[in-house]
Image: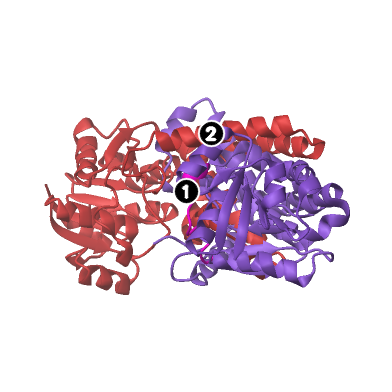
Chain colours: A red, B purple
Amino acid sequence: MIPVLAVVGVGLIGGSFAAALRRAGRVGRVLGVGRRPQTLARARELGLIDEAATPAEAARQADFLLLAAPVNSLGAILAELAPALREDAVVTDAGSTKQDVVAAARAALGARIGQFVPGHPIAGSDATGPESADAGLYRGRNVILTPLAENGEARVLRVAQAWQACGAQVREMPAGQHDAVFASVSHLPHWLSALYVAQVAASPDAALRLQLAGTGFRDFTRIAAGSPEVWRDIFLSNRTALQAELAELRAVMERAERALADGDGDALQALLEAACRARRDWSASCPPDGRPGDRA
Amino acid sequence: MIPVLAVVGVGLIGGSFAAALRRAGRVGRVLGVGRRPQTLARARELGLIDEAATPAEAARQADFLLLAAPVNSLGAILAELAPALREDAVVTDAGSTKQDVVAAARAALGARIGQFVPGHPIAGSDATGPESADAGLYRGRNVILTPLAENGEARVLRVAQAWQACGAQVREMPAGQHDAVFASVSHLPHWLSALYVAQVAASPDAALRLQLAGTGFRDFTRIAAGSPEVWRDIFLSNRTALQAELAELRAVMERAERALADGDGDALQALLEAACRARRDWSASCPPDGRPGDRA
């Protein structure tokens, strides 16, 4: 049970966390913190939060704080919270990168870094804002925690239990491993999808192309509609790991382009078969409710 | 009304065409032609075809022939059909590339090239085989015809009306324009999705990566599960147009990678905003039943 929860950033991620805990009966009062008063007012109307609060008010009152704001703002938010933060409070975040968030948290919290348990829920959509909040968003999803040596088991457990109450499965791994894995399975797809759409949109016959685009285009580019600010920050935050994946991909692409230029059907087919097999195996390994596998 | 329809390749594309025409009451008998007897037997069990036929039998009997086989096999199929082809028969295809199919058809049919009206239905999924056939597959979808000077209006009209009876919208354009547009909106996404999955699958920690992949990965990689043979042939058939698109994309990627390396957030955001705007506009322009736009 969390007597007072504070959510900084009451959009899809933060709003869904509050809604899930409320539905599970695991939270008393919910405070919402954010830059835009109209967003907080809407979150209150929707019943996601009980009231809006300043960072200082939230720090003084909350037992548990979730930071669901863009990754490059987390250091400044923690610095605002730090002076008034209750000693028994635990703070976690929902940032898509972890090494840079940990560095920012260390700078902001100093000796109180043990109160910050870094986290990353693997859930989302291209929807944004409090209207998109969904108490079921985390059901069956993975949440990664990258605990610090200073955290202590009890604090990590409190964060893990909150996510479990939302229906999520919690895993722990080092921050560096987290960042490498998500550069590969999340950031690189977004990079490719967005740059591809930018290229199509800049072509002289873009209107005709887009008129004739079908379901393959639709699925491949869905993530390109995500927030430009959020993704700019993720790419910059996780630059080193993303660059490493891009280099690996470039090697595969050069091999394939050579096969294409040479008319080497066998080499092309070997690459396509490896991809097809891996993707079909991945679908087959997914739970029957279709998460994270294919929709029916 | 088509008294005798022959479908060469009774899988998703050919089977759905037969099923749609039958449901519309626009076809008498349906012959199925294919390499695998068990596929034809299954198509007959499912009611997609009335009987299996050899290419020569189909040529002698059919008023209308749809070739729904891999693009690089169409020349050989047409050569087999040619000697027995009825003079009043019209032949069309469902190949994803058109310039190479036209060249193969000219070589196979010679003076009878006017009987061949090149076509491409913009519909599909990663499902294959007669079980995946769906009488509603073409409803609301685009079908592109790239008529030849030799076709004559009446033959083009017969093919257009058959697709319209399946619920599709028919458009005409030159084969070269068709190939450039689909290199961009279909072949390049498949190329990127498949090579990306091949790269992930070849990584030393592929199992962990795939365990943590979420909904973005799922949608971005759905098309990578498509048939390796079919896509190998499409890439080779449309090589020149695909290489041109790859060169354009490479220029955008290099610009983005420079911005990433320089920490140039403004340049990155400009690219991401162009992509986000184009993708959101595209979704908004789609018909309410969600085709070809986003699923609900």
- Bin the neighbour count of mark 1 within 10 Å (Cα to Cα): few under 14, some 14-19, many 20 and up: some
Q: Which mark is residue B38?
A: 2
Q: Chain of mark 1?
A: B
Q: Give yes or no for residue B93 being in the magenta stretch.
A: no
Q: Chain of mark 2?
A: B
Q: How many numbered tags mark residues here?
A: 2
Indicate the position of residue B135 as horizontal and vertical percent values.
Answer: 48, 57
- In percent of the image, x 73 and y 34: which residue is there? A265
B50 displayed left or right of A212: left
Please, what is the three-letter code of the amino acid marked with disc 1? Gly
Residue to which mark 1 is pinned: B47
Q: Which mark is residue A138?
A: none
Please, what is the three-letter code of the amino acid marked with disc 2? Gln
Q: Quadrant of residue A260?
A: top right
**Quick one: A262 or A250, which is closer to the camera?**
A262
**Quick one: A37 or B71, which is closer to the camera?**
B71
A67 displayed left or right of B11: left
Q: Secondary structure at mark 1?
A: loop
Residue furthest top as drawn: B204
Residues at discs 2 and 1 both on one chain = yes
The chief SS type of the magenta part is: loop
- In percent of the image, x 49 and y 39: which residue is there? B42
Point out the stretch of residues depicted in magenta.
Answer: B129-140
Disc on the earlier residue, 2 or 1: 2
Indicate the position of residue A98 as horizontal and vertical percent values.
Answer: 41, 41
Indicate the position of residue B103 as horizontal and vertical percent values.
Answer: 83, 51
Q: Give yes or no for residue B132 being in the magenta stretch.
A: yes
B288 displayed left or right of A133: right
Q: Is residue B54 above or below residue A42?
A: above
